[in-house]
Amino acid sequence: MPPGSEWDTAALIVADKKYVWHPFTPMAAWCAPDHDPLVLVRGQGALLWDSEGRQYIDGNSSIWTNIHGHNHPHINAAIRRQLDLVAHTSFLGFTNPAAIRLAEAIVGLFPPATLSRVFFSDDGSTGMEAALRIVEQFWRLQGSDRAEFVAFRDGYHGDTAGAASLGANVMFGNDSSEWRPPVRQAGSIADLERLPGREVERIAAVVIEPLVQGAAGMKLWPAGTLAALRAWCDRTGILLVADEVLTGFGRTGRMFASEHEDAFPDVMVLGKALTGGYLPLSITAVTEKVFTPFSVSGGQERTLFYGHSYTGSALGCAAAIASLEVFSREKVLHNLGGKIDLLRQRLATIDALSCVREVRQCGFIAAVELIASESAFGEAVCLAARRGGLLTRSIRNIVVLMPPFCITESELVQSVEALRKAVLEVCDTPAMVPLALL
């Protein structure tokens, strides 16, 4: 019996279309009678199976979260051990061994005298929300008027109200009047250096996705950008916030993107791959300088009134500890180097296609930008790749390839070839050929 054949796919799809609301999904098209969504039921390593028993390579690491593969025995065992103790207890006024051990392990990954304190949240968006509130209160506790944030154009830092104000509202055409901090957009370090002194004095922090802007289509920063920004923040006394939700935990070839230019921030937000892609958990790590105003004696104003019911989840923390252990047990970063090189070599076969504007790569992150500007082209390529056994997702006309680190070399070659054939299939379809190619 093929994997998944015991599932009643038709009944599941009917129930999904009747009861479920999917994120970032046009629901009219999703619920259309002719739309036949995949029902994913099982995973092993870099592979997934649907309810009909069809096998796919997980080409976007289950929305950029899964790094060691599905059903990893070490992470599975850690979660089971924690389940036998307790799944979750309140972190408000209490603590638990898993959260303590994880905080210690994470801080141990940073250089001395940098990030030293960990605040837990649920996901990247809430981790960034915590970062914004920490920064705002940090300055307020010191009687400073600094309250403005700088975010870079095309940046994406989450979709909760405050985090979305840094870029997502504009990116997705939803510039609503929800609560948000004052935000200034910049395009480059040069933009910041041209700011008058009186405006610089109002800035509380600059927020950046180091090395690569993810939701913008994996846009790469020029070399030296992060180091230059760190230097500018040091000169002006402004805090630097690094959004490493995407780039953290090996995606760029090092544990953190900040390592590449030896430019560690005052605040770092981590999520997605933190638990190996198993459970929701994020971290907002801060320096002792940022934490100190909250820890001195005083009244209620020195308490950070922010947190969620599942903050410091023991299950999530147990999974994250196990994921960090896998890095050392399996020499993940060492072994990843060869796969990064192989990915670069194979992507050259796509970069040569006439309908491809650009192929971008940063570590184990790859993006194929099509010449056509319409998002329908990217979606069509993803559907064609699915027929070739590869699951991934597009960002408008940009198709992203970000498989788990555990992917075998043969699976990696298969992934790029499936993507190459999908691009050719879409470009060779008369109804889909962009005018520039006619």
Image (spheres, grey):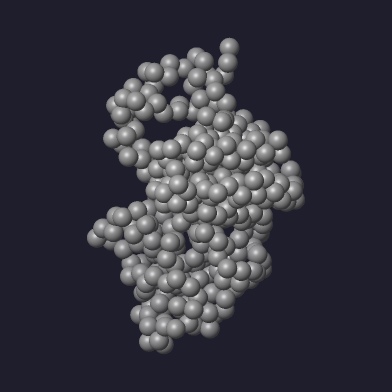
Q: Residue at x 39, y 63 (%)?
A: 166
Residue in the foreground of this view, choosing between 71 and 379: 379
Front residue of 433 and 421: 433
Q: Examine the rendered structure and indicate whether residue 196 appears above or below residue 302.
A: below
Q: Indicate the position of residue 236 as horizontal and vertical percent values.
A: 49, 83
* Residue 399 in view in this figure: yes
Where is residue 388 drawn, in percent x and y?
56, 31
* Quadrant where the N terminus is found in the figure: top right
Residue at figure coordinates x 34%, y 33% from the top left: 30
**Could you say which is closer to the camera, residue 56 or residue 254?**
56
Residue 186 position within the rendered picture, expressed as x and y whole percent measured from the top left: 42, 72
Q: Please give the name of the residue rendered at 55% of the width and 65% of the height, measured from the top-left corner.
A: 221
In front of the other: 436 or 362: 436
Residue 112 horizontal/vertical position (percent): 66, 68
Q: Is residue 253 left or right of residue 173?
A: right
Q: Residue furthest left?
A: 177
Say how many tags the image has. 0
Using the image, determine if residue 200 lies above or below residue 309.
below
Residue at the farthest bottom position: 197
Q: Is residue 170 left or right of residue 60?
A: left
Snapshot quadrant of residue 264: bottom right
63 in relation to 73, above or below: below
Q: Residue at x 44, y 67 (%)?
A: 152
**Measured along the vertical axis of the image, is residue 312 above or below residue 306?**
above
